Image: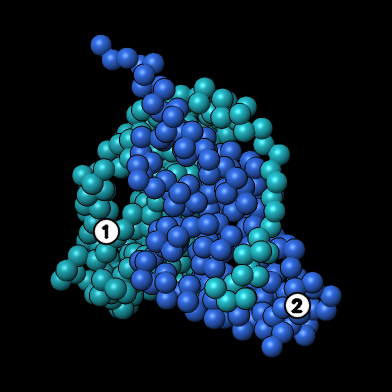
Amino acid sequence: MSRSMDRLFRARPDTADAIDRDALFAQIVATPQDHEQPQINRSGRRRLLIGCIALAVLCLTAGTAFAVTGFNLFGWHTDTTIVNSPREWQRLYRDATRRLTLPPGEHWPDRTLPPDTVTSRTQPGGTAVAISQTAWECYWVAAIRSGNTAAAGQAHVALDDLLAHHVVVAPPGSPENVAPPAGTKPPFAIFASDGGIQYTRKMYRDAAHGHPATLIQSCRANGPVGTR
Amino acid sequence: MIDTRTQAEIAEARFAEVFQNLGSLVRYAAARGSRDPEGIAAEVMTIAWRRLPSLPADDPRPWLFVTARNLLMAERRRTGRQAPFDERHAEAPAPEAESGDPAVTAALMELRPADRDALLLVSWDDLTPAQAARVAGISPVAFRVRLYRARRRFEQALSAQQGGINGSPTVGMEST
């Protein structure tokens, strides 16, 4: 080992923590475990992947009916750049995951672009936003079920933040390859102007006021098998 | 009929092994500038207990550190603290702890966040390169390359610090 590295080792901060370990251990093991939340298994991941791909395809194709030539409204425009390389797709996805959060204990799943596929440059980020949103929703549901108000509050804050900073609503009549005005900071998911964002906001408001039925449905519909 | 007491004992025994990492997590959180490192470590352990069946059976340490990192980033976001580096490289909260060796601290802060994190994961957090690669979310090969470069840059930065900080008790050892 070089002297520099040895010096780095010796410079490690001495953090004598003030935790009563025995008390903490006893306190933790006295709480219930999440028997209803096993690790997301491979089939669950596969289903989530299929769900995300289906969502992406739906978003791309649904706009076809509203395609408008020369579309430009408040800076929204058609995006002619595409991604057809899994490597490029994964880079955009990784960049997106570094700007988003997941609930404690969650990991970003591996994602890639299926072979012989093209998509827009905003799609990897949109996928990451959808994963973060679903993960926080299911975390919120689990927190409600276990009576963990702190975790529920954390999830609510995270989801409000996600809607505020990582979701944009395309103008009515947007084409399928719509892109927001230049300067919109990625990652973001593009919602159609069909009331979806208002529905989502109401779902979170209702859950925060003790009416989580729609939130539970959303988690059940979109979440991995083990988190429903 | 299932003997739930036996199951509980088995779970507690396994968690006791996981719990031995508490001190490492406190140090990890403190070195990354957490305002409540003990709280972060306790929260990680609480989550680990809650999700014990889903913890990697062979080696839970990367899982624990990734969870700690997520909590640190959530804490940072909650408290509205501006990350002291470009978000494009926000792979982990930056270390802010005083190392007790000003030259080392200064040299560390000159590194890119990803390099700094790689270096600290193996030197301060006692992770093997393979474990640290899982925490960093990259392949072991890519991590070893990053670690090699980080070490080289750290050594260069530390050398540059030699004349800058007088009075450090170990400065003389590094002089060439």
The residue tagged with tag 2: helix, strand or loop? helix
User: What's the residue at 57%, 34% (across, down)?
Assistant: A150
Pointer 2: what residue?
B171
Q: Within the image, what quadrant is residue B119 found in?
A: bottom right
Residue A94 image point, x, y percent: 39, 65
Which residue appears at 47% of the width and 37% of the height? B17
Disc 2 marks a residue whose amino acid type is Val
Q: Name the residue tied to disc 1.
A: A56
Q: Tell me, what hue is chain B? A: blue
Q: Secondary structure at mark 1?
A: helix
Can you say whether A18 is above or below B78 in the image?
above
Q: Is residue A51 visible?
A: no
Position of residue A79 relative to residue B93, above or below, is below
Query: On the rendered image, what quadrant is the C terminus of chain B found in?
Result: bottom right
Seen at 42% across and 72% down, the residue is B144
Q: Chain of mark 1?
A: A
Q: Is residue A141 left or right of residue A88?
A: right
Residue A207: % across, % down: 47, 32
| Residue occupying the far right of the picture | B167
Indicate the quadrant where residue B145 lies. Answer: bottom left
Q: Given contact means CB atoms under 8 Å apart, are the residues at marks 2 and 1 in contact?
A: no
Identify the colour of chain A in the image. cyan
